Image (cartoon, helix red, strand yellow):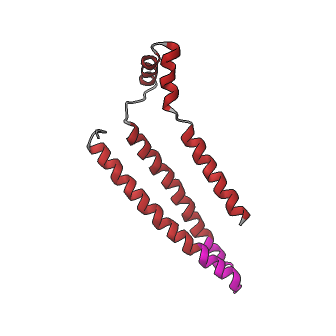
Amino acid sequence: MLKKIKISLIIIGLFLIFFSAANPSLAQNLSLKFGNAPGLIGTTGSQAGLSNTPLPNIAASVIQVVLGLIGAAFFILFVYGGFLWMTARGNDEQIKKAKKLITNAVIGLVIIILAYSISYFIINALESSGGQT
């Protein structure tokens, strides 16, 4: 139980670090200190090869990548559950543990696939509208 809590806290921590790193208000505050900072940021971004992709499209793409990584984690749990079952050697307790792990992994995979398909639909809707709301 303690191991699951630690893993959950690590995942939540990584999620918070990842999404707190991109803070658009920091770029807006630069204009107060440096005058033409937004123009300089745009020039620097275009020189670096960055495009003017709308923020909802970027967020949707990030969500798809995160869902893909979580889906891969559930697939690994599914394979690990199968490995536990195959190496149980008739141990009923280990077989029950493996069945529970496989069941939970399949449920997780179904949820992730549904979430991925919803985010894919949203991305296509945003791209077809050109980022306009």
Farthest residue toward the left? 129
> Which residues are drawn in magenta?
81-101
Farthest residue toward the top? 35
Residue 18 x, y percent position in the rendering: 57, 42
The quadrant in which the N terminus is found is: bottom right
**Total numbered labels placed on residues in the image:** 0
The quadrant in which the C terminus is found is: top left
> Relative to the observer, which residue lies in front, 132 or 116?
132
> Relative to the observer, which residue lies in front, 74 or 84?
74
- Report whether 132 appears left or right of 86: left
Q: Is residue 55 above or below residue 25?
A: below
Q: At 31% from the left edge and 39% from the top edge, which residue is drawn? A: 131
Q: At 42% from the left edge and 17% from the top edge, which residue is drawn? A: 39
The stretch drawn in magenta includes residue 84: yes
Residue 10 x, y percent position in the rendering: 66, 52
Q: Is residue 65 above or below residue 51?
A: below
Q: Quadrant of residue 102?
A: bottom right
Q: At 63% from the left edge and 73% from the top edge, which residue is drawn? A: 83
Residue 88 x, y percent position in the rendering: 69, 81
- Report whether 16 appears left or right of 131: right
Residue 19 x, y percent position in the rendering: 54, 42
Residue 38 visible in this rendered orientation of the protein:
yes
Q: At 67% from the left edge and 57% from the top edge, which residue is drawn? A: 7
Secondary structure predominantly adopted by residues drawn in magenta: helix
The stretch drawn in magenta includes residue 23: no
Q: Is residue 85 above or below residue 38?
A: below
Residue 89 visible in this rendered orientation of the protein:
no
> Relative to the observer, which residue lies in front, 115 or 73?
115
